[in-house]
Image (spheres, rainbow, N blue to C red):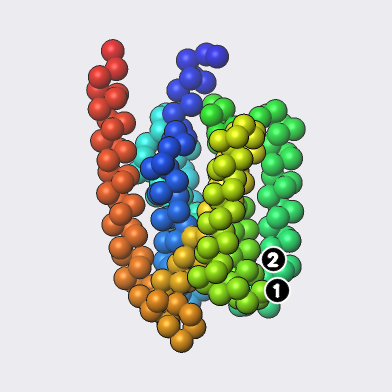
Amino acid sequence: MNATAARWLNKVPEVTLSFWVIKILSTTVGETGADYLAVDAGLGAGWTSIGMAALLAIALFFQLRTKAYTPWIYWLTVVLVSIVGTQITDILTDKLDISLYTSTVIFSVLLALNFLVWYRTERSLSIRAIVTPRREVFYWATVLCTFALGTAAGHLATEALGLGFTLGAVIFALMIGATLLAWRLGANVVLTFWITYILTRPFGASLGDLLTQAKTYGGLGMGASWTSAIFLCVIVLLVAVAQIGVGNRRTLRP
């Protein structure tokens, strides 16, 4: 592997406990943040989608131009992908009257096709092998598909199937736990990573709805603004710690 490829290994963070905590918080912020902007702030689904898509395009531009993993740019992109993925599903459901069953199938097919093309082109789906710009484009396309699919699947489970927010969150949490157990028992690392990555989105969507929705609808009534603010503060704190850690490692590097 040449020097350029080695530098690209740093474009995606190591998969640690902190990675999963920030990922879950980001998925919840995607759910609550989209609801806050579209409903509470009165922007509507259309303007929210346009504004967040524009910000996502800017964040992706800087993310793809960086020469090494930069925590604040990477996680800002993840949060924006989460919001845009939520909005895509909400527009299909609320504006185009496409059922959650249909949108779940559509995004499942798109995700499968993305994985297929990615693997046939690069012969690897591992995030430890994101060593070229093309692989990073595949990576972010996959991330967007997982967020859109997770939103649709989460709403399908909690609303269309009538599981409710609490039971939905518990079921997705148990599925994540079962996947992690399979990994500990020797299941394929890449497969279990992507399954967990996909499942954290509907878990985050269910958790977000549980926290924000009114008690009459089975939620805790915290509201989208407070939930988004609290979770964003935690994300900023964890990302700041990661950013300082990366900066210290680069300073100490000979």
The answer to whether mark 1 and mark 2 are in CB contact below 8 A is: yes
Specify the quadrant that holds the C terminus. top left
Residue 122 circle label? none
Circle count: 2
Quarter residue 130 falls in? top right
Residue positioned most to the bottom:
216
Quarter residue 226 falls in? bottom left
- Name the residue rendered at 29%, 25% in the picture: 249
- Name the residue rendered at 52%, 21% in the picture: 5
x and y, in percent, of residue 78 in the image: 46, 50
x and y, in percent, of residue 148 in the image: 59, 59
Pick the residue in front: 177 or 119. Answer: 177
Mark 1 Cα within 10 Å, few/some/many (few <14, many 20+)? some
x and y, in percent, of residue 169 in the image: 52, 64
| Disc 1 residue type (three-letter) | Ser
Specify the quadrant that holds the N terminus. top right
Classify mark 1: helix, strand or loop: loop
Q: CA distance from mark 1 to mark 2?
A: 6 Å
| Disc 2 residue type (three-letter) | Ser
Quarter residue 240 falls in? top left
Q: Which residue is mark 1?
A: 99
Left or right: 56 as drawn, with respect to 110: left
Pick the residue in front: 251 or 237. Answer: 237
250 is higher (above) or lower (below) than 228: above
Mark 2 Cα within 10 Å, few/some/many (few <14, many 20+)? many
x and y, in percent, of residue 25 in the image: 41, 55
- Name the residue rendered at 66%, 30% in the picture: 124
Pick the residue in front: 183 or 41. Answer: 183
Pick the residue in front: 182 or 15. Answer: 182
Q: Which residue is mark 2?
A: 103
- Whether residue 221 is visible here, answered yes or no, is yes
